[in-house]
Image: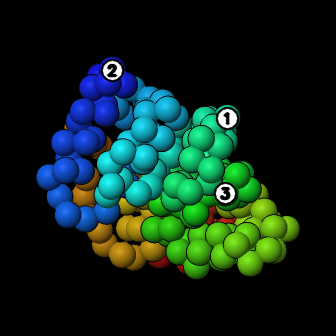
Amino acid sequence: KATQKGLIAHFTAIADSVKVPVILYNIQGRTGVNIAPETIVYLFNNVENIVAVKEASGNISQVAKIMQLTDGKIDLYSGNDDQVVPILSLGGSGVISVLSNVAPRETHDMVQKFLDGDVDGSREIQLRALPLIDALFCEVNPIPVKAALNLMGKEVGPLRLPLTEMEPEHQAQLKQAMIDFGIEVK
């Protein structure tokens, strides 16, 4: 864990050590610390190659605050597949997605429809995808997505410890959600 001051120092040092654009990834569930909106905005405004954030806090109010404090100038990507449309509605740029590994066309279409002004079409895909999204997150990522890809015949291989194979009841739930969404399983 780190303080916000420590996060600023850390991300600044990383960004200063590379010559490519940097996307911050805010995922408190994995890191144990939330990158506060003010910290994201400070980094965006003061570190030239920090250009975007993958926001996976699950906190829509935080997303709104980031967009408000940057005047909508930051590229903000949903890091939660169940919040793509709400984040787009606040000025988000798209999604960095788990769902896209098993339903790339639908994930693309969800975002593109929204950007093209077809909010109803975008929302329909978002809502129809929720059971599959839930199944893709019923165990720790990437366990379900690897199971889904293997079910699709992609042969992505086994997991490495400490990750273990998906529980049979969850695999059955995932398989059914994939079928219901129209994904062919082997």
Element at badge 3? loop
Q: Nearer the viewer, residue 119 or 73?
A: 73
Residue at image mark 2: 3
Dot placed on the residue nearer the N-terminal end, 1 or 2: 2
Q: Nearer the viewer, residue 183 or 3?
A: 3
Is residue 186 visible in the rendered image? The answer is yes
Residue at image mark 3: 91
Q: Amino acid at mark 3?
A: Gly
**Mark 1 in CB contact with mark 2 (< 8 angstroms):** no
Residue at image mark 1: 61
Dot placed on the residue nearer the N-terminal end, 3 or 2: 2
The image shows residue 12 at horizontal and vertical percentages of 25, 42
Q: Residues within 10 Å of mark 3 (few under 14, many from 20)?
A: many
The image shows residue 76 at horizontal and vertical percentages of 53, 54
**Mark 3 in CB contact with mark 2 (< 8 angstroms):** no
**Mark 3 in CB contact with mark 1 (< 8 angstroms):** no
- Residue drawn 59% across the image and 41% down it: 69
Q: Amino acid at mark 2?
A: Thr
- Picture quadrant where residue 105 is located: bottom right
Element at badge 2? loop
Dot placed on the residue nearer the N-terminal end, 3 or 1: 1
- Residue drawn 73% across the image and 70% down it: 114
Q: Residues within 10 Å of mark 2 (few under 14, many from 20)?
A: few
Element at badge 1? helix
Q: Residue at the far right: name it.
A: 120
Q: What is the basis of the colouring in this image? A: rainbow
